[in-house]
Image (tube, helix red, strand yellow):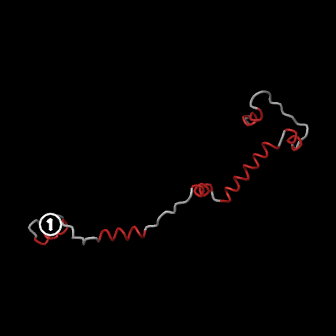
Amino acid sequence: MTQSKNPPFDDPLEAAFADARQTMPPIPDGLMARVLADAAAEMPMPERLPLWRQIFGTLGGWPAVAGLAMTACVGVWMGGALTDDLMYTLTPVDGVALDIGPGLGAFDMLLVDG
């Protein structure tokens, strides 16, 4: 014979337990407010950083920003100071010229397969 999982309805002890499960115990006045205030006091508050520190932090900090600034300075210098005459003297092979005709200029070399 198997017993059912539901207890019989005429059991007074089970009826008392069912009533106890249905009713919420009374909470003293102000207890929940004190508990929530204590919890809020223990929570860490995020530090509000200025915008420039957030950007530097996203980029990787001062060393990364210094590297980006140096790279930008070298790019501006190379774009303005290195003329064609100077670039011809800096080429490792003298007398080699590549004429690719009209089009995209030096960018055409990037489009060549192989």
Of all residues, the one furthest to the top in this rendering is 102
Of all residues, the one furthest to the front in this rendering is 50
Q: Position of 23 compared to 83: left or right?
A: left
Residue 13 x/y as whole percent:
13, 72
Of all residues, the one furthest to the right in this rendering is 95
> Height in image: 40 above or below 113?
below
Q: Nearer the viewer, residue 19 or 14?
A: 19
Determine which quarter of the picture holds residue 8.
bottom left
- Mark 1, residue position: 7
At label 1, counting other C-alpha atoms closer than 10 Å, the crowd grade (few under 14, some 14-19, many 20 or more) is few
Picture residue at 73% right of the left edge, 37% below the top: 110
Query: Where, quadrant-wise, is the C terminus in this rendering?
Result: top right
Q: Position of 112 compared to 96: left or right?
A: left
Q: Nearer the viewer, residue 89 or 48?
A: 48
Residue 12 x/y as whole percent:
10, 71
Picture residue at 40% right of the left edge, 67% below the top: 40
Picture residue at 17% right of the left edge, 70% below the top: 17
- Numbered-mark total: 1
Picture residue at 15% right of the left edge, 67% below the top: 19
Query: Where, quadrant-wise, is the N terminus in this rendering?
Result: bottom left
Amino acid of disc 1: Pro
Element type at marker 1?
loop
Residue 76 x/y as whole percent:
76, 45
Q: Position of 16 compared to 59: left or right?
A: left
> Height in image: 67 above or below 97?
below
Residue 16 x/y as whole percent:
14, 70
